[in-house]
Amino acid sequence: MSEQNVRIDRRRLLQALGSAGATGAVFSACGRSTQTASAHTGGSITGGKWEKTVPLATAGPGGNPGWQPGDAVKFLPPEKIPASGKASDLMASLPKDKLLTIYQRMTASRIWETTMKDLFVGGKDGLYGAFHTYIGQEAIACGVMGALEDDDYIASTHRGHGHLIAKGGDLNRMSAEIFFKKTGYNKGYGGSMHITDMSRGIMGMNGIVGASFYLAAGAAIRARIRGTKQVGVAFFGDGAAASPYYFSAVRSSANYKLPVIFVNENNFQYMGVPMATVVPTRYICEYTKGLDIPHFLVDGNDVTAVYAATKEAVDWARAGKGPSVIEGITYRWYDHSGFAGGRTGVDGAFGLPYRSDEEVRQWIARDPVVRFKAWLLYKELARASELEKIEAAARQAVEASIVFARQSEDPDPRAGVLHTYASEAAPATQFFSRSGLVIPAVS
Ligand SMILES: Cc1ncc(C[n+]2csc(CCOP(=O)(O)OP(=O)(O)O)c2C)c(N)n1
């Protein structure tokens, strides 16, 4: 294995564990409290508050010699704003409009999901169905997408709203789909986990854990056959790495030198168990260490680090050198799906049995959106007023998308069958509506 290609730098990441507090000036400069997380009382981009301390939950026993439940607290990414260094300098060299677009999408993603969370919890709109929030992980989607072109492909996960928004997905159509309306991305028949937009290379969110690997590899094969320079990106969680398809897809992609980038979003949580109980190595990117491909281990709450790693991975792939793996260490603020422990107007879900509230608060203190904003201001790449204008516009766009969704028509149950393969192969004559009634299909 070529040393040059292996980017796992544990020493530096572990050193970073002790670096909190070094950056007080930067955070106070942008109106962010630099006190410990438990003393923090607000100031998030959504205007939400953190809930007061509740008793710590206890996690189960860990089976991993590297990680133990609760280690997510120890592995906090540094609060430090990367004022210089390769990643910071590379990102700072991007044109201003591109940086502002990344900030706009990151902000829109946070506000859209937080608004949806509050609507689900509030109960007035009668929203139902699975909804996996991406809140807390936005730097990964936005850092990756910043290094892609519009026609590159992404294969998302069950937790993919942030991927879609980062790649330019349409908020109106997304909101309408969550409301199961005719104007939604899937005409109101799919809900959160099927949102797809091929016009933007978004091959879809996916309820099948581990499906992204071969979708992205397939897109890469298509690009190879057509002779384009497009790349395929597979997002996946730490739990999905347990899929037998993971190693198989990376190995095959390495074998054929396919332009695929496997982006692991290591949020330490596998549904309701800490990652430590199911992951046998310290890092996910160690799974494929034996393959002679680049591996990047980055602070997934730092958009500059994610962008820099992706840029290198994309250049590598477009040069015909094959796949690579990026692992971003991050954290999800809410429960796996739905909103147990979540409250309207409160940032983060608390009181869940598989993680401690203190852990949640400490990760919220490393809010990736706030960190990116702080970085833009610190580097004097944007003025506070410009960023506030972007935040206000994002809030307005999200609100408008909710109005759009509420005012849109319900889908005609009889049209559902028209959008299935069954309707073409073997036209159905009748099917069941949501209420269980048998309805004749439209001929
Ligand atoms: C093939 C398959 N197996 C199991 C599930 C049930 N399931 C849904 S999400 C999930 C956990 C995924 O964890 P991870 O990959 O770490 O992603 P995260 O939820 O942390 O973002 C599981 C097991 C599924 N949807 N598909």
Image: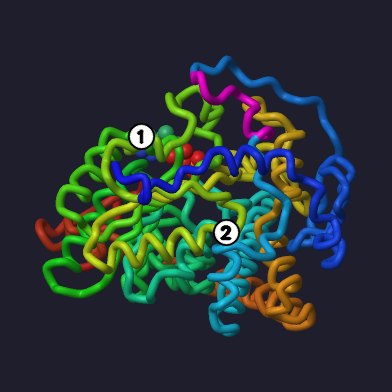
- Mark drawn on residue 139: 2
User: On the image, numbered disc 1 is attached to which residue?
Assistant: 287
- Amino acid bearing label 2: Ala
Are circles 2 and 1 on residues that touch, CB within 8 Å?
no
Secondary structure beneath label 1: loop
Locate residue 337: give its quadrant.
top right
Q: Residue at x 81, y 60 (%)?
A: 27
Write down the region rendered in magenta. 64-74
Q: Residue at x 55, y 83 (%)?
A: 95
**Mark 2 residue crowding within 10 angstroms, few (<14) / some (14–19) / many (20+):** many
Q: For the stretch drawn in magenta, what is the main secondary structure?
A: loop
Q: Amino acid at mark 1?
A: Tyr
- Residue 412 part of the magenta segment: no
Q: Tell me which numbered mark, 2 or 1, is placed earlier along the sequence.
A: 2
Distance between mark 2 and mark 1 Cα atoms: 23 Å
Residue at image position (67%, 43%) is: 16
Q: Nearer the viewer, mark 2 or mark 1?
A: 1
Query: Foreground: 384 or 396?
Result: 384
Quarter containing the C terminus: bottom left
Is residue 69 something one can see in this rendering? Answer: yes
Magenta span has 70? Answer: yes
Report whether 278 appears left or right of 55. Answer: left
Quarter of the picture for ligand 1?
Answer: top left
Q: Measured along the vertical axis of the image, is residue 200 above or below residue 119?
A: below
